[in-house]
Image (cartoon, rainbow, N blue to C red):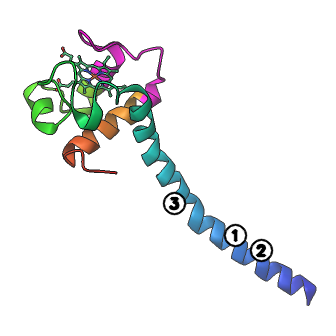
Amino acid sequence: MRFKIYSIFLTVFLLLFLIVSPTLAIAEEMTDGAEIFTVHCVGCHPNGNNIIRRGKNLKMRALKRNKVDTLDAVINIVTYGKNNMSAYKGKLTKDEIKTVSEYVLDQARNNWRNP
Ligand code: HEC
């Protein structure tokens, strides 16, 4: 009898874990890009703008015009910097650079309306 109750508990627990853990993983990945952006980029790029060079903002139209609308191009500018934007090589890992670049493109596609 006891054993039965335990195994029911265990099954329920395992099921819950299986349901919850992938959701947590996704949520974490989504905040990661936003978090990196908030810490490292938002000072010059609030809401996808550019407070130093207005035309070089992170909205899709500007990214297209300046040919920075692919993941590789964004990764490149974040890694090596450009003019008044410093390089993040050494400050962020390769993975972090990729994550934040994906976030920038995602936001650009949504016109910076994501939470
Ligand atoms: C010190 C201010 C500053 C910070 C911090 C900064 N940037 Fe920039 N960013 C700039 C400037 C200035 C430019 C324009 C560079 C140029 O002359 O083309 C730029 C350009 C860009 C561009 C190209 C935009 C376009 O339309 O050409 C991208 C993408 C970008 N930044 C992403 C980022 C990301 C991601 C971060 C954080 C990891 C970041 N920036 C942090 C100042 C900054």
- Secondary structure type for disc 3: helix
Looking at the picture, which amino acid does disc 1 mark? Leu
- Which residue is rendered at x = 65% and y = 72% of the image? 15
- Disc 1 versus disc 2: distance between alpha carbons? 6 Å
| Residue extending farthest top | 83
Q: Which mark is residue 14?
A: 1
Residue 57: x and y in percent read: 18, 29
Residue 70: x and y in percent read: 21, 32
- Looking at mark 3, is its residue's CB closer than 8 Å to ligand 1? no
Q: State which region is magenta.
A: 75-96
Residue 3: x and y in percent read: 90, 83
Q: In the rendered image of this protein, does residue 25 appear above or below residue 11?
A: above
Looking at the picture, which amino acid does disc 2 mark? Leu
Quarter of the image where ligand 1 sits: top left
- Secondary structure type for disc 1: helix
List the residue tagged with mark 2.
10
Marks 1 and 3, the one that precedes in the sequence: 1
- Which residue is rendered at x = 22% and y = 23% of the image? 51
Point out the frontmost of discs 3 and 2.
3
List the residue tagged with mark 3.
23
- The quadrant holding residue 35 is top left
